[in-house]
Image (cartoon, coloured by chain):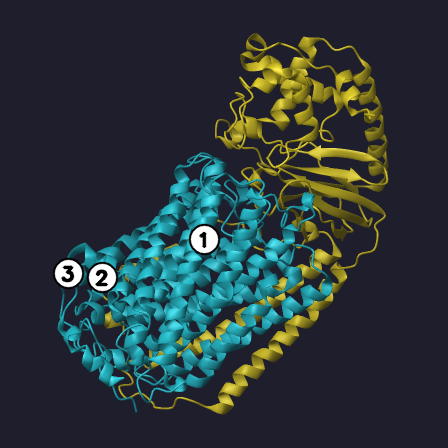
Chain colours: A cyan, B yellow
Amino acid sequence: MSSVIESHHDDHHHGPAKGLMRWLLTTNHKDIGTLYLWFSFAMFLIGGAMAMVIRAELFQPGMQIVEPEFYNQMLTLHGLIMVFGAVMPAFVGLANWLVPMMVGAPDMALPRLNNLSFWLLPFAFGILLSSLFMEGGAPNFGWTFYAPLSTTYAPPSVTFFIFSVHIMGASSIMGSINVIVTIMNMRAPGMDLMKMPLFVWSWLITAYLLIAVMPVLAGAVTMMLMDIHFGTSFFNAAGGGDPVLFQHIFWFFGHPEVYIMILPAFGIVSHIIETFSRKQLFGYSSMVWAMLSIAILSFVVWAHHMFTVGMPLAAELFFMWATMLIAVPTGVKVFNWVATMFKGSITYETPMLFAISFVVLFTIGGFSGLMLSIVPADFQYHDTYFVVAHFHYVLVPGSIFSIMAAVYYWIPKWTGNMYDERMGRLHFWLSFVGVNVTFFPQHWIGLAGMPRRYPDYALQFADWNMVSTAGAFLFGASQILFLFIVLKTVMGGKKATPQVWEGARGLEWSVESPAPYHTFSTPPKVN
Amino acid sequence: MFKKINNLSKSAYVALFMLSLYPSKVFSDWDALNMREGVTQVSRDVFELHMLIFYICVAIGAVVFSVMFYSLFRYTKKRNPNPSTFHESTKLEVAWTVVPFLILIAMAVPASKTLTEIYDDEEGEINIQVVGYQWKWEYKYLEDDINFFSNLSTDQDEIYNLVPKGENYLLEVDEPLIIPVDTRVRFLITANDVIHSWWVPDFAIKQDAIPGFINTAWTRAEETGIYRGNCTELCGKNHGFMPVVVKVVEKDEYSDWVLSKKEEAIKLAELTEKEWSLAELTQRGEGVYQKNCVACHQMNGEGLPPIFPALAGSDIVMFDKDRNVEILMEGVQGAAMQSFANQLSEVDMAAVITYTRQAWGNAENGDGEYVVPSDIVEYKKPKI
């Protein structure tokens, strides 16, 4: 290994190329990580703007701002962009930056594949967004695109949507292969699997989930394509097909997908809580086993999204019990985080604030998830705002808060500059208040009977929808502040030390801040 | 810790506090924030289950969060400069794996029991087929051969804020489903086009209406009254505009209603026999059009191309009467246009076709031919 590195000795000292070509042709994991993070931030703002359109329309009963058909396009694109464009690429960006540094590798194992998997994304989302300007409008069938609404009854742009999902899937699969190969082959000597940082563990598991389910999604959209253009009837009852089959296939992908969006968050939050509690993480091995059990269970719970499709009693009971079981490993993780903080020596920098609120609010999302798993009660909750509140609690103060926490935590390592702590805390508090004011009342309007994906609603839901919209605009506006803080940190600020945080442990903190363009060309020693 | 929090964070605290006061003053009706208990044994069981799980979650949350917030205040760097070094405890970890598991079993037992009750598939005293359409419901009483559609009756002007909204805004229909009290009613739920979902919160029934499948649900309502629900599966642009309204009446009243519906059917047959003038048909047709066609083809006949084509200036509507009838009777394969053969009576079918062939200048620019009810009767006769 080391002889190979030495034969390319010249490479170590050249810096990045200049200009646009640096970013187009780069095979450097740090550059590609940066590209992923900026891309996902751009998508977060676009998807967020769509959420603002949705919330503005729901500010009052009646149709005011958009027509129902455009409203449906907004809620579809909002979901697709946030899931595939914002959350997933952000985690891939973090993996790119951090996994090689955390395992003591010089770069990702497959750098050119890495470049390709990023540069596919702008095309995928360019195609998806261009459908807004097509005749008949953008996809309007929800991010879950249930057939036959997404086949026989879909606008013509559905074909472009299918193509775009294929490209995103290809990108994700390449990214996952890269992560797995890097982790399996390029760990520094002495770094056993059970010594790996939890973020690396969480990504190893996530990458396997992605490889397992992305082809299933590709299969689903290909079957749609066949139904639409080649006269097959996979999902068309009139031709002997089965619309429920679509949902089984979709959720066989879709449920592991939701864990793909939360497992890396578990890794991030574990690191941050450990650092700012100045105390070793409680129950490292049980954290790993919990993530593994969650990942395995994710393959046998998919039909809990489909309790109302009319499955036989035995199936309903099985999926209810299996789903409830997920609460056990998830609970273990929460208890471990609390036990880590117990008798620690805690300080409250911005990353820690985001991480603590992650634990609290993700747990609330977990509770509503547990409630949703109870089938008879789910008959009342299903497809109401209670569900909207549930999955936004696990995705916004869950996944997205963890990403923000990660940015504040590692940005001194990426840029060499400290962010502005006062502004970081302001951003946290505005986001925290905004997110709760937006989504907490949605539990109530859901229980009171407001269905989701409605452009207009009955009068009894008016007050809390107004509150929810006010919260959404506060949350939206505070992300502009986030953009400003990040830009300010990139441009300058107090210089960061290599260790950055007093309690920080791990290989990435052993290199300079900012991290040199090439790190660990010689593998570090791990005890 | 508090000293470290700067002024801006303090104002965030104040804002949070103010917000927590705001709702209790303005929104007095807290009952409207929870699930409804409903009017059936099943719906009450479901409600109790919901409250049980809710309280268990609150209790677990209270324990976990109080340990957490105690740690956050007690073990700050200032109060506890030297952190402990413990990082595992097999006893503790086994305990917080096993205890939640036992709590889950305590939840799963009543849940499974209630679910088994709901999944009782026995036939009802009355059996009603519920069919979802874009964007209305059809109710077929299988024993009494009664069959009608239930459309949103809220005025478009209310939706577009031109007039004040009524009390049951978006939760009212032209003809509700009517069922008798204290009677086992079974619903056979399916759909004609895309997937819909039929939800009546007060019965705790939510079943997807899926083309090609028949799902069942049952209820035994214990109180008379009007119960309102919704479609709960995204089914296209008017998903939010196809409510479910069920009227539960006394048994006598129900029998009377069944009789009156049968008389209505006889009257309608007489209407089909009648000689209709062009003016009469056009006038009737306009009403039918407003109720059944405007959602897609729009009041001005321009439609929303390419999915919902324009009728104004359409070659078929202006020049091809036979194809015009065929489309309404059979629908268009692979497109959003459904068959209206079972939705409209012969009179209404003839009237609405005549209206579209007369309106928006179609008569002046086209052949001006119109359709009478006997044409539709003729069309429906089996062809040899």
Q: Secondary structure at mark 1?
A: helix
Screen quadrant of the N terminus of chain A: bottom left
Residue A423: image tag = 2
- Gap between marks 1 and 3 measured at Cα: 36 Å
Q: Secondary structure at mark 2?
A: helix
Mark 3 neighbour density, 10 Å: few (under 14) some (14–19) many (20 or more) = few
Screen quadrant of the C terminus of chain A: bottom left
Does label 2 or label 1 sit earlier along the sequence? 1
- Residue B202 shows in this picture: yes
> Which amino acid does the dot numbered 1 rest on?
Val
> Which amino acid does the dot numbered 2 rest on?
Met
Residue A165: image tag = 1
Residue A94 % position (x, y)? 32, 67
Does label 1 or label 3 sit earlier along the sequence? 1
Q: Secondary structure at mark 3?
A: helix
Does label 2 or label 3 sit earlier along the sequence? 2
Residue at screen point 18% across, 59% down:
A488
Q: Are marks 2 and 3 in contact (CB under 8 Å)?
A: no
> Which amino acid does the dot numbered 3 rest on?
Met
Number of marks: 3
Residue at screen point 26% across, 58% down:
A482
Q: Which residue is mark 3?
A: A491
Q: Quadrant of residue B259?
A: top right
Same subunit: marks 1 and 3: yes
